Image: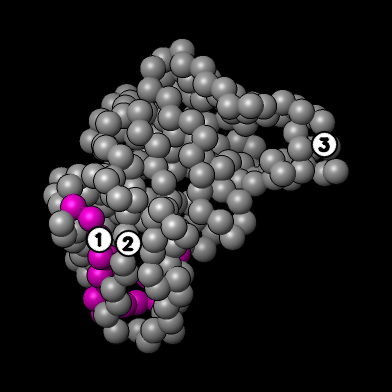
Amino acid sequence: ILNVEQSPQSLHVQEGDSTNFTCSFPSSNFYALHWYRWETAKSPEALFVMTLNGDEKKKGRISATLNTKEGYSYLYIKGSQPEDSATYLCAFRNTGNQFYFGTGTSLTVIP
Amino acid sequence: GAGVSQSPSNKVTEKGKDVELRCDPISGHTALYWYRQSLGQGLEFLIYFQGNSAPDKSGLPSDRFSAERTGGSVSTLTIQRTQQEDSAVYLCASSLTSQSNQPQHFGDGTRLSIL
């Protein structure tokens, strides 16, 4: 069984706070690490696809880092807004083109 | 729209019946993926297609599950002799290619309920 772990499971923050989540994955057979944002009643939306150790990606107030040697990725949200409330999923893609998703971090931003 | 389209959006059927779920990927996307999410669980990878070919079917939960893709476009996931544990949301995603840097674009899913 291949484990992709996300922490914390859920998070409540005040509007304006910055926050971060962790995704841990196997350090072997790495091909890519994906981050998705999943709002209730919508389909998952791609945030980042990261392929190289040391990758850092940024999209507006959201950024992510990748460490393939130790098997973790961090997602950061700066100055959280209520519209950031969603479940954030990471997915590990191995060299066999199989995807393994974590169970997500549920973020609630309180106005 | 130009997104991934799945049908039906909801399906309720009796145990033992066969069901067919359809996914229409974004035009031009060569890679297509099927997942399911059972209640309280994360997304479970089922199978992926590169063109019409599925290189690895080991993610399918049992031999009651099969999938095909024709014309490099539409894919169907078929579940034969459905069981209650098959109840889940089945999600389809497509990407332009299966290269490592390609994100997946998801459909809205089919919610399958087995009575």
- Residue at 48% x, 51% y: name it: B42
Viewer-proximal residue, A79 or B39?
A: A79
Q: Give the amino acid type for the residue marked by disc 1 in the picture.
A: Ser
Q: Where is residue B32 in the image (x, y as percent from the top left)?
A: 28, 49
Secondary element under disc 2, as helix, strand or loop, is: strand
- Residue at 82% x, 31% y: name it: A16
Q: Position of residue A84 (x, y in %)?
A: 69, 41
> Label 2 crowding class (10 Å Cα cut-off): few <14, some 14-19, many 20+?
many
Viewer-proximal residue, B66 or B3?
A: B3
Secondary element under disc 3, as helix, strand or loop, is: loop
Q: Give the amino acid type for the residue marked by disc 2 in the picture.
A: Cys
Q: Are marks 1 and 2 in contact (CB under 8 Å)?
A: yes
Residue assigned mark 1: B75
Q: Name which quarter of the figure residue B12 lies in.
A: bottom left
Q: Distance between the residues labelled 3 and 2?
A: 38 Å
Magenta stretch bounds = B72-91
- Residue at 72% x, 44% y: name it: A83
Subunit under mark 1? B
> Is residue B86 found inside the magenta-colored segment of the image?
yes
Residue assigned mark 2: B23
Subunit under mark 2? B
Residue B107 circle label:
none
Q: Do the residues labelled 3 and 2 touch (CB within 8 Å)?
A: no
Subunit under mark 3? A
Viewer-proximal residue, B19 or A1?
A: B19
Between disc 3 and disc 2, the foreground one is 2
